[in-house]
Amino acid sequence: MTIDKMKSYLFDANLSLKAKGLLSILLTYDNIKDKQQLSEYMADGRIGMDNGIKELEENGYLQIIRTQQIGQACIFNAYSYPKFLN
């Protein structure tokens, strides 16, 4: 795989290392459906995770769709380049 430096989140100076790590997890494990599952991969705690999620949303790398489906709290749509800018 070739990394396009202009589109890759790894080279985005607007993202903290925490947000980059969080996005790496979301892109690697596409079966993560809620914050509880996501927290299993982090030692930062809930506040740190929430701050990283907010940062990714604000910079267009993450879209969260809340759902009413049983057993599924939300759907994380994660992108390696900014797609949804608030």
Image (cartoon, rainbow, N blue to C red):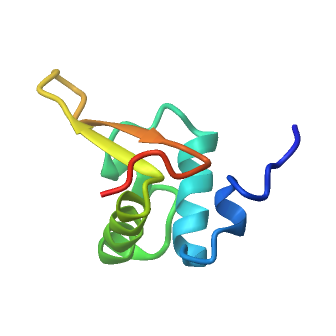
In this picture, is 43 found above or below 34?
A: below
The quadrant in which residue 71 appears is top left
Rendered residue at 87%/37% (across/down): 1
* Percent position of residue 31, x then y: 48, 31
Left or right side of 31 for 50: left
Rendered residue at 32%/52% (across/down): 35
The quadrant in which residue 77 appears is top left
Q: Quadrant of the C terminus?
A: bottom left
Residue nearest the observer in this picture, 85 or 55: 85
Rendered residue at 50%/65% (across/down): 42
Residue nearest the observer in this picture, 31 or 3: 3
Q: Residue furthest top?
A: 69
Rendered residue at 63%/77% (across/down): 13
In this picture, is 38 found above or below 34?
A: below
Left or right side of 24 for 76: left
Left or right side of 9 for 4: right
* Percent position of residue 16, x then y: 55, 78
Number of numbered discs on residues? 0
* Percent position of residue 60, x then y: 43, 54
In this picture, is 9 found above or below 63?
A: below
Residue nearest the observer in this picture, 32 or 15: 15
Q: Residue furthest left?
A: 68
* Percent position of residue 39, x then y: 41, 58
